[in-house]
Image (tube, rainbow, N blue to C red):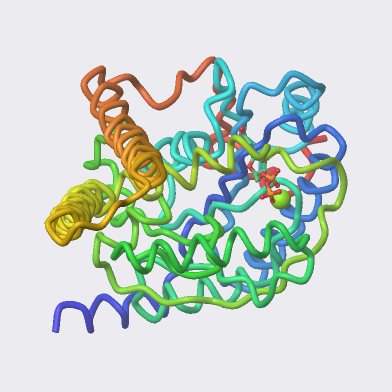
Amino acid sequence: MENMTDNRERNNTTPILILVVPCYNEEEVIGKTAQVMADKLKRLSKEGVVSDKSRVLFVDDGSRDGTKRILHSLCTDSPVFSVITLAGNSGHQNAILAGMMFAKDKADIVVTIDADLQQDIEALDEFIAKYKAGCEVVYGVRNDRSTDGPVKKLTALTYYKLMQFLGSKVIKNHADYRLISAKALNALSGYTEVNLFLRGLIPTMGFPSDVVYFDVKKREAGTSKYTFSKMLNLAIDGITSFSTTPLHLIGVMGFLATILGGILGIVEIVGWALGKNFPGYTTLLIVILALAGLELLSLGVIGEYIAKIYMETKRRPHYIIDTVIWQDPETVRNSHLGNRK
Ligand code: UDP
Ligand code: MG
C-alpha cells in the first residue's frame, strides 16, 4: 500500500533530473552534446515533466585533450551545466559512479548517458514516465546492434550468453544508459566493493525496475574511447565480481582429468596383462600437454580471483575528484536554462 501512495504522489511531481555524462577526450563532440542535452532539459521542464532545477553534470575522466577547457567554458555560458574533474583517468564505470554519488543528494533522479550522443536522448520521456509509474531503476536497452562491427556483435553476444550461464542478472543489450532514483542511489552507495560492475550490481538490488528500448546511433564525432583492453577488463570484472563458477569449474575439470587418467591407466594395465604393447610416448605426450594446459588455465583463473581479493583489501577509492564546478539551482534560479547574459 505504501508503494501505491508513493506512485500517486509521483505522478504529480516534477522531479529534479541530473544527467550524468562521463567524458574522456571528447573535445570533438562535447559542445554539440551539451547543446542537445540542454535543449532537451529545457523542453522537459517547459512541459512540466521535470523540475526547472534539472541540469547536466559532466564528469571529466582525466581527459588529456581540450575537453576540460570546453566544459569549463560551457559552465560560464550557462548555469545548466556543472563539471566534476577527476584527477586521472579512472575509467567509464568509475566516472559514472563519481557523477552519481555527487548527484544523489541534489536530484530526485539521475540518468547516466554517454557523451557521444549514441544513445537516443528522446528516450528520456519514457524513462521518466516509468519512474513516475513507480520504478526506481529504468534500463535503456538498445534495439539492435546494426552500428556495431561484426567482431563487437559476436563478442557481445558470447558475453551475454556466458554471463547468463554463470548466473548473473545482467540485462541484455543494456549499457549504462539508465535512470536511477535517489533512493536507489543511496542503496548503491552502500556497496563498497572496489571491482565495480554497475550493470551487474544494480539489478541485484531488487528495486522495481523496467526497460526502455532505444535506437543506437553512430557516434556524432570522435572515436570510441573503449579500447580492446578496457573492454576485456570490463568483461572479466563482470564475471569475476559476480560469479565463483569458474573456480568451481576448475575443480570439476581436475576431477574429470583425474578420472580420465585413472581409466587410461586401467586400460594400459589390462592391455599389458593381456600381452599388448602400447606406443607409450604418444599417450604420454597427450596426457602431459592436456594436464599442463589445464593446470595453467586453472592457475590463471585462481590468479584472477586472488588479484581481485588483493585489490579489495586495499580499499582504494574509485576515483579522486580534482575540481568541482557546481552551479546550485537555488542561487542561479532566475537565469536557469538560459544564458546568463
Ligand atoms: N569514457 C570515460 N572514461 C574512459 C573511457 C570512456 O569516461 O576511460 C566515456 C566516454 O567519454 C563516453 C562513454 O564513456 O562518454 C562511452 O565510451 P565510448 O563511446 O567511447 O564507448 P563505446 O560507445 O564505443 O562502447
Ligand atoms: Mg559510444
Q: Residue at x 52, y 35 (%)?
A: 95
Q: Is residue 196 left or right of residue 321?
A: left
The spot of residue 19 in percent (x, y) is: 58, 50
Image quarter where the C terminus lies is top right
Q: Position of residue 146 (x, y in %)?
A: 77, 71
Q: Percent position (x, y) of residue 108?
A: 40, 56
The residue drawn where x is 20% and y is 54% is 268
Quadrant in which the N terminus appears: bottom left
Along the horizontal axis of the image, is 23 left or right of 211?
right
In the rendered image, the vertical position of residue 193 relative to residue 321, given as above or below:
below
Q: Quadrant of residue 332?
A: top right
- Answer above or below: position of 41 versus 215: above
Report the number of numbered marks.
Answer: 0
Please state if 115 lies on the left or on the right of 275 as rendered. Answer: right
One can see residue 280 in this view: yes
Q: Nearer the viewer, residue 38 or 68?
A: 68
Q: Residue at x 56, y 59 (%)?
A: 177
Q: Is residue 4 left or right of residue 28?
A: left
Residue in the foreground of this view, choosing between 200 and 227: 227
Q: Is residue 339 above or below residue 321?
A: below
Which quadrant of the structure image shows residue 42? bottom right
Q: Tell me where residue 251 appears, x and y as whole percent.
A: 17, 49
Residue 252 appearing in the image: no
Q: Residue furthest front?
A: 275
Q: Nearer the viewer, residue 333 or 125?
A: 125
Q: Nearer the viewer, residue 83 or 156?
A: 156
Specify the quarter for ligand 1. Answer: top right
